[in-house]
Amino acid sequence: MNRQEYFEIGKQNSLPLRCPILNYCARRACTIYFNSDYARYSGSKNIAEALMEDGTLPNDYLKNKIDFQGEPTEWIGGRESFYVTHMCPEVNLFDSSNSIFPDTACVTGDYDRERRNEKSRVIKTQHYSECAEFNKYLFEKNIKPQTKKRRIPIAPKFKALLQKEINSKCPLCPNEDVGHFEIHHIDENPENNNLENLLMLCPTCHSKITKGDISIYTVRKTKRDLTG
């Protein structure tokens, strides 16, 4: 499953393009820890400590952590030959620095250096909506599946307030030569035009949010910083 296929599943189910619990999901944290072999360099620290120390996880991770639901991530073998399962699909699909099955939403796969063909094999792919942790999040937040949202025009008054809020500069990058600004719905709901849900930014950063290169955590923190 590539990015286009992954995004299409989200659109068809009226879900955010990227998993909304990434920064607090134990499955993602564990997948990154295994994939990038943190144990070799941070053996005295547990998963949360190692990833919080280098900024991969936010400082409030432990307070808001969504723990494993069902089978945890499992790595069997070493670096020459291994089998890994129950991974977070978003790590392999979007996080190139921590991926061992790049550009695919792989949750189960294996590797054998001695194998002649297909040393790396993707055995199973999955969308984040199939993860037990995401469904636990929906249940606890009492979020029900919704029909496809329609985009409601944003009032000119709101646009003026948002541009004043960012002082006519993109809040996510140093680019000072922005031809026009775009407005991002922080909760990915185009019907929610409340000011606290809107962030004005440059088209490049808007695109990066859609692709997942800028995290939901960063977007929300930026909005909080702007509004005090």
Image (cartoon, rainbow, N blue to C red):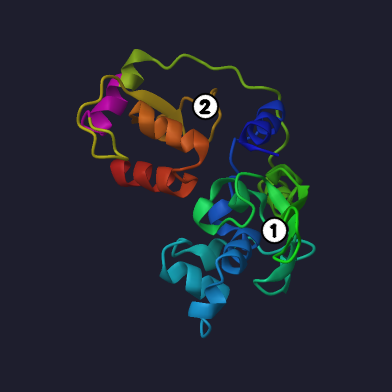
Asked which secondary structure carries label 2, the reply is loop
The magenta-colored residue range is 160-168
In the displayed structure, 151 sits above or below 110; it is above
Looking at this rendering, what residue extends furthest in the front direction?
Answer: 116
Q: Is residue 35 above or below residue 221?
A: below
At 35% from the left and 44% from the top, the residue drawn is 222
Q: Amino acid at mark 2?
A: Asn
Whether 53 is among the magenta residues is no
- 59 on left or right of 32: left
Crowding at mark 1 (Cα within 10 Å: few <14, some 14-19, many 20+)? many
**Residue 99 placement (x, y as % from top left):** 58, 55
Residue 151 seen in the figure: yes
Picture coordinates of residue 42, whole percent (x, y): 49, 79
Write the residue at 46% across / 14% down.
153
Residue under pointer 1: 87
Residue drawn at x 26%, y 33% as measured from the top left = 166
Q: Is residue 125 left or right of residue 65?
A: right
**Viewer-side residue, 122 vs 57:** 122
Label 1 element class:
loop
The residue that label 2 is drawn on is 192
Q: In the image, residue 205 lies at what x, y percent?
A: 38, 34
Q: Is residue 162 magenta?
A: yes
- Figure quadrant of the N terminus: top right
Q: Position of residue 191 (x, y in %)?
A: 55, 22
Instruction: From the image, give the main secondary structure of the stretch colored magenta.
Output: helix
Residue 197 seen: no
Give the mark nearer the N terminus: 1 vs 2. Answer: 1
In space, the residues marked 1 and 2 are separated at their CA atoms by 33 Å
